[in-house]
Image (cartoon, rainbow, N blue to C red):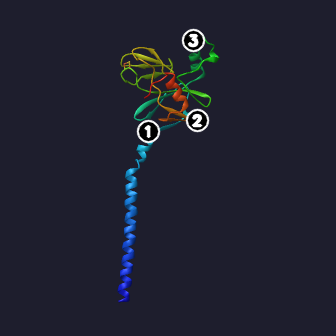
Amino acid sequence: MANDTKRRDFMGMALGGFTALGGLGALYAMKRTWDPLPSVKAAGFTTLDMTIYKENELAVEKWRGKPIFVLKQSKEMLDTENKNMSLLTGKTTEAMDKKRLIKVGDAYYMVCVGLCTHLGCIPGYTPEDKSFLCACHGGMYDDTGMVTKSPPPRGLDIPPFKIDGTKLVLGEEGPEYKKMLADGITMPV
Ligand code: FES
């Protein structure tokens, strides 16, 4: 009789244990259902290590399924931009603000969505000319993504970004990006 009681007690404890474990398992399963998948969590953001890019060499990254052009500027490219800007504005080159470029550390980068703002073709870059050509309708952009030949209605769009040391987080809106939006340098993508 005593043995029966012990066995029942043991069975009761074991069942209780299983139930508790089952409950935990169910809770875990529910939590997994509530949490976004890791791939979904990471999908909105792309972190770029800006130290790996070479001057005047176009790199194509990906953010939210879109191609992202990254073009590190050489001194020569910056000098040309300064020259063009000073011709346009009449200001000295030292005062020039490279408005479409992103400064990370000491270097300047063009970081743009690689889709033509006319009808969405992917423009090609020619390092010798430092210029982008969209073969669909002949639109052209300079090495900062500014339109140099129509029909594109505006420069290449700049994705939301946040500077984080030597990294650039695409998908986050840092103060530099917000200023670009406020100044009308780019449109929200
Ligand atoms: S899609 Fe690029 S010029 Fe028309």
Q: Residue furthest bottom?
A: 1
- CA–CA distance between discs 1 and 3? 38 Å
Q: Earlier in the sequence, mark 3 or mark 2?
A: 3
Most foreground residue, 74 or 167 = 167
Whether residue 37 is visible to the viewer of this picture, yes or no, is: yes
Question: Does any portion of residue 53 appear in the rendered image?
Answer: no
Q: Is residue 178 above or below residue 40?
A: above
Q: Is residue 63 above or below residue 87?
A: below
Closest to the camera, between mark 3 and mark 2, is: 3
Foreground pick, 180 / 150: 180
Task: Choose between 138 and 104: the one closer to the eye.
Answer: 104
Provide the residue designation for mark 3.
Answer: 89
Kind of residue at badge 1:
Gly
Count the labels in the image.
3
Quadrant of the frame with the C terminus: top left
The quadrant of the rendered image in which ligand 1 is seen is: top left
- Residue placed under numbered mark 2 in the picture: 166
Q: On the rendered structure, is 100 left or right of 23?
A: right
Density class for disc 3 (Cα within 10 Å; few <14, some 14-19, many ≥20) is: few
Give whichever of discs 1 and 3 has the lower sequence position.
Answer: 1
Return the residue nearer the eye: 173 or 168: 173
Helix, strand or loop for disc 3: helix
> What residue sits right under mark 1 in the picture?
44
Q: Are marks 3 and 2 in contact (CB under 8 Å)?
A: no
Residue 26 position by quadrant: bottom left
